[in-house]
Image (cartoon, grey):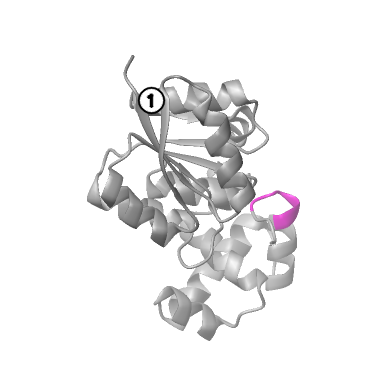
Amino acid sequence: MDKINILIVDDHPVVREGLAGMLAGQPDFVVVALAANGAEGVALFEQHAPDVVLMDLRMPVLDGVGAIEIIRDKRPFAPILVLTTYDSDADIVRAIEAGATGYLLKDAPRDELFRAIRAAARGESTLSPTVASRLMSRMRAPAEENLSAREIEVLQIVARGSSNREIGKQLHISTATVKTHLIHIYDKLGVNDRTSAVTAALERRILTLD
C-alpha cells in the first residue's frame, strides 16, 4: 500500500495533535510534521515534501492563504487541503485563488476528511458540501453582485475601521484606487456608504468578523 505523507498546519495544539492521532489510525497515512503557523508550514513543507498539506487559514505570523501562495510558487501542483472553521465567501475565494486544491470545514465527518486527503494525493479537488453550495450560489448570482477577491479584501479592512489611506498602505495601492474599489463595492451591493457595505456583506456572508 502506498503511504500518503501528510503535513498538518494549525495554530491550535489540541487540533494538531487530535488530527495527527486520528490520521495515524489509517494504514496509508503518515503524519510527517506538525506546524503551528504558516511560516513553519512553509519551512516544514520544504524539509519533508509531503504528499498532502492540511492547512488552517487564520494563524499568526503567516496565515494559511499566504502559506499556500508561497508553497504553490515553489511547487505549483502541491496538494493543499484547507481545513478550517470559516466558510465565508471571503475565506473561500481567497483560499481557492491562492491555489488550495480542496476546502473542508473542521466539523466534517472523519470519513469525509479521509476521502478528501486520498483524493488530494491523487491530484483531485474536494470541497465540503457547504463550501460547494456557497461557490455554486456565488457563480449563479448576477455578475454585478459578485465582489472580486480584491474588493472583498478591501471590504474586510474597511470592516476593521481603517481609513482609505490605511487601506492603501496595507494593500500597497493608492488612495484613489481604494476609492475606486469602494465605488464598485457600493454599486454591487446597492449601498451608499462604508457602514452599509459592511452590514450588507455580513448579512450575505460575503464577510465574517473574527
SS at badge 1: loop
Q: Is residue 82 above or below residue 164?
A: above
Q: Is residue 19 above or below residue 196?
A: above
For the stretch drawn in magenta, what is the main secondary structure?
loop
For disc 1, the neighbor class at 10 Å (few under 14, some 14 to 19, many from 20) is few
Number of callouts = 1
The residue closer to the viewer here, 194 or 86, is 86
- Start and end of the magenta stretch? 202-206
Give yes or no for residue 79 being in the magenta stretch: no
Q: Is residue 125 left or right of residue 71?
A: right
Left or right, residue 72 beside residue 168: left
Q: Which residue is mark 1?
A: 124
Where in the figure is residue 193, as x and y percent of width and height?
69, 72
Q: Nearer the viewer, residue 187 or 51?
A: 51
Q: Residue furthest bottom?
A: 165
Answer yes or no: is residue 145 visible: no
- The residue shown at (47%, 61%) is 150
Q: Quadrant of residue 49?
A: top left
Residue at the spot 52% in from the left edge and 76% down from the top edge: 179
Whether residue 82 is visible, yes or no, is: yes
Q: Is residue 34 above or below residue 43?
A: above
* Vertical arrangement, residue 164 with respect to residue 57, above or below: below
Q: Tell whether 111 sits left or right of 124.
A: right
Residue 113 x/y as whole percent: 55, 28
Q: What is the quadrant of the C terminus in the image?
A: bottom right
Residue 117 coordinates in the image, percent (x, y):
45, 28
Q: Quadrant of residue 48?
A: top left
| 205 drawn magenta | yes
Could you say where residue 145 lies in the image, as x and y percent from the top left?
Answer: 60, 49
Residue at point 61%, 26% (across, down): 110
Query: Quarter of the image containing the N terminus?
Result: top left
Amino acid found under the numbered disc labelled 1: Glu
